[in-house]
Image: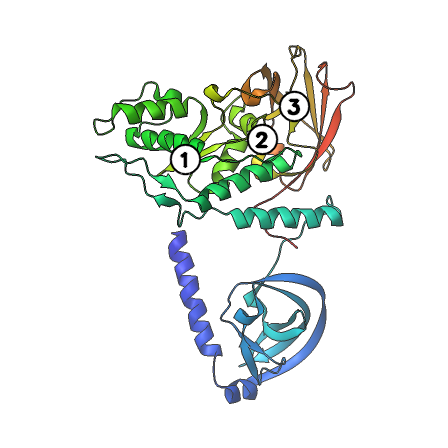
Amino acid sequence: MTHHFTAKLAIAGLLTVGILGATTSQASAKTKVRYYQDIKNASYTVTNSKATVYTSATLKHKKGTLKSYGSKVTGYYAAHISKNGKATVYYKFKVGKKTGWVWRGYLKKAATLPNIFNSSEKAQITSYQKTAKSIGNSTSGMYASKPVYKNKFAVGKLSSTYINKTLAAINLARGFYGLPNVTAPDSWNASAQYGAATLAAANQGLSHGLDGLTQPSFVSDAAWSKGAAATSQSNIAQGYSGAFNTISGYLNDSGNTMPGHRLWILGGITQVGVGQAGEYNDLKVFDIDSGLGHATKTVAYPNSGLFPAEWSVGTFWSLAVPSRYDASKVSIKVTDATTKQNVPVAAVQSDDGYGLFDTEISYLPKASMIKANHAYTISVSNFAGVPAGYSYTTKLFKIGSVTN
């Protein structure tokens, strides 16, 4: 029903453009400026790039369409006019030194960040958002050689472009902690591709080591063995294909009480392998034969300072340290510093090993109280893995939205 309504709106919009797109003489004969009004400078998103732009509020002369001004403009003046006997409003806008007038219905006021962010933080958020957008989720050109996993089997190979976008997403996340970038050697990518392709061929869900999955008759024993080895040393996922969304899914790690996928990405690794076949992803994060390293830095999740809300909402938060401590009596307190409310915390638990950390704590803040554009203070006590009085504040922002 919603789609039908949207379609009708779109058709109505086209009809309106047809009616208002009369000849210049017709428009000027029936257009009268009633009064002008100063409006506060604000950023607007263009909603119709084909909309006609005029040189003045009298609408006598056209100067092209909004397409030539880009996707964002600054509106700063309004004209209330009578057009064909009906009252309407046109905005004067600018982009650099270029100006024009357009019907305000073709401009939507852009969202602005609330006051919890200072000017420096807003600039940093914009930079993060641009990076995320450049990584994106396009699957165009994903494969250098497309995998085959129905009725016959060919492992396939990912393009270097797609692998590099996955690396960029991982290293963006690690950058929030000052962790070194990881690389993706060809041998690891080849291994991960076997993991993804055999999972896709079985198409029976996820299983590390392919345990419990039925080997299809068209997959050789050698290929199945390589897939089993890969998936036993990897993060694996189903239902993701875009590079940014896949890594975001591993970081959010919703549904896992101990967010091991996240801890591997932010842990003591130096390289990964990237594999994808259909909706199955294999991200190789360690190799037993190559030896294992060790995490060297404490990772609190979400981090102190700015952090993406999409990676933090509706999931367990965590604290991982590179040394072994007793976490049996740890206490976690979360406060919404924006609303000054305590956030209930449940399911505090500990583990070790994921991401090559020695002690890992996870806890679940009340999901309905975790929101973008809010700041949260996290305090940890009764745990020797952090200094006494350990407390920090995180500010959650939407990395997927574009703001000015």
Q: Position of residue 336 (x, y in %)?
A: 70, 33
Residue at image mark 2:
367
Give how far across and how far down residue 91 sits, in percent. Answer: 63, 71
**Label 3, label 2: how far apart the Cα atoms are:** 30 Å
Cα separation between marks 3 and 1: 27 Å
| Residue 206 drawn at (x, y percent) | 38, 26
Q: Residues within 10 Å of mark 2 (few under 14, many from 20)?
A: some
The image quadrant that residue 151 belongs to is top left
Q: Quadrant of residue 28?
A: bottom right
Q: Earlier in the sequence, mark 3 or mark 1?
A: 1
Camera-nearest residue between 99 and 367:
99
First in sequence: mark 2 vs mark 1: 1
Labelled disc at residue 325: none
In the displayed structure, would residue 43 be above or below residue 277? below
User: Looking at the image, which residue is at 56% across and 23% down?
Assistant: 355
Q: Earlier in the sequence, mark 3 or mark 2?
A: 3
Which residue type does callout 1 highlight?
Answer: Gly
Q: Nearer the viewer, mark 2 or mark 1?
A: 1
Three-letter amino acid code at disc 3? Answer: Thr
Question: For numbered disc 1, what is the local secondary structure?
Answer: strand
Please give the label number shown on residue 296.
3
Q: Residues within 10 Å of mark 3 (few under 14, many from 20)?
A: some
